[in-house]
DNA sequence: ATTACGATCATCT
DNA sequence: GATGATCGTAATC
């Protein structure tokens, strides 16, 4: 299989450079990159097609806005740290800390398009909750790194994609910021952006 | 085609 | 005790 471990060497450095930017830029960078899940002798891989940027302490919609707690601690970690939280009594959501250690900006991974080798249903990673269910992502991964061997969930280099932009989904504060980025050509994108009129 | 609702629990007040 | 970065199904247009 093509992605049988975390990124290393020059690939890792390029990914780290992309993540070490403010959330909106890091989110654009993450579009088209690949999430790899190694679980029970199986390797699942999917290309990220939809993300949202959360700007940390200055963003009323961000979890970090309410302060640093045991749950949100990974947001302050180095770029590539996973932040996973549980929501609505049944779903998990996957975030990746970006910018730099000590700055709680992050990117929510909302949808991905499975690559051939994983043999997943094409729409099985459409939406943040479904993506986590399909890739078996839960609270155990919160605080782990996208570059650590023992995470079993990694970020690998894919292609870069032209980003369509909209406001973010499912939030009630800071609803007008254009911080959702998606691949308009992908069927795996979760929802059509709400009309802005 | 769009809107409404219930499920269900970690986390914070 | 209230809330929520969702999803699937059901009801209504």
Image (cartoon, coloured by chain):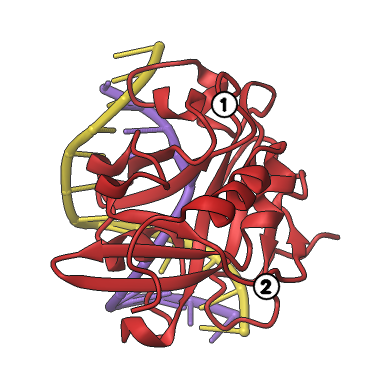
Chain colours: A red, B yellow, C purple
Left or right of A45? Residue B1 is right
Marks 1 and 2 belong to one chain: yes
**SS for dot 1:** loop
- How far apart in space, not on screen, are marks 1 and 2 (Cα)? 25 Å
The dot on residue A197 is none
Q: Residue A166, how many percent across, how many down?
A: 74, 59
Element at label 2: loop
Residue A30 is at least partly visible in this image: yes
Give how far across and how far down residue A75 sits, in percent: 48, 29
Q: Quadrant of residue A43?
A: bottom left
Which quadrant is the N terminus of chain A positioned in? bottom left
Question: How far from the left and from the top, in percent, is residue A50?
Answer: 59, 64
- Residue linked to disc 1: A104
* Picture quarter with the C terminus of chain A: bottom right
Q: How many marks?
A: 2
Residue A185 vs A181, above or below: the answer is below
Q: Residues within 10 Å of mark 1 (few under 14, many from 20)?
A: many
Q: Which residue is mark 2?
A: A183
Which one is earlier in the sequence, the residue at label 1 or at label 2? 1
Task: Specify whether A117 is left or right of A89.
Answer: right
Residue that appears at 63% across and 28% down: A60
- Tell which subunit mark 2 falls on: A
Name the residue: 15% across, 70% down: A41
């Amino acid at each position: 299989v093509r992605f049988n471990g975390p990124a290393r060497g020059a690939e890792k450095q390029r990914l780290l450079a992309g993540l070490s930017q403010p959330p909106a830029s890091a989110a654009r960078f993450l579009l088209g990159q690949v999430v790899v899940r190694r679980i029970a002798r199986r390797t699942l891989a999917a290309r990220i097609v939809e993300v949202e940027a959360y700007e940390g302490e200055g963003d009323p919609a961000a979890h970090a806005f309410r302060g640093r707690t045991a749950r949100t601690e990974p947001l302050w970690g180095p770029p590539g740290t996973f932040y996973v939280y549980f929501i609505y009594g049944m779903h998990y959501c996957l975030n990746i800390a970006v910018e730099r250690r000590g700055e709680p900006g992050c990117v929510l991974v909302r949808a991905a398009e499975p690559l051939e080798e994983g043999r997943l249903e094409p729409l099985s990673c459409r939406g943040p909750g479904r993506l986590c269910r399909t890739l078996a992502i839960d609270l155990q991964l919160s605080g782990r790194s996208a570059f650590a061997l023992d995470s079993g969930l990694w970020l690998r280099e894919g292609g870069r994609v032209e980003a369509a932009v909209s406001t973010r989904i499912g939030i009630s504060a800071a609803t007008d910021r254009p911080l959702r980025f998606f691949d308009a050509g992908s069927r795996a994108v979760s929802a059509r952006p709400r009309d802005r009129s």
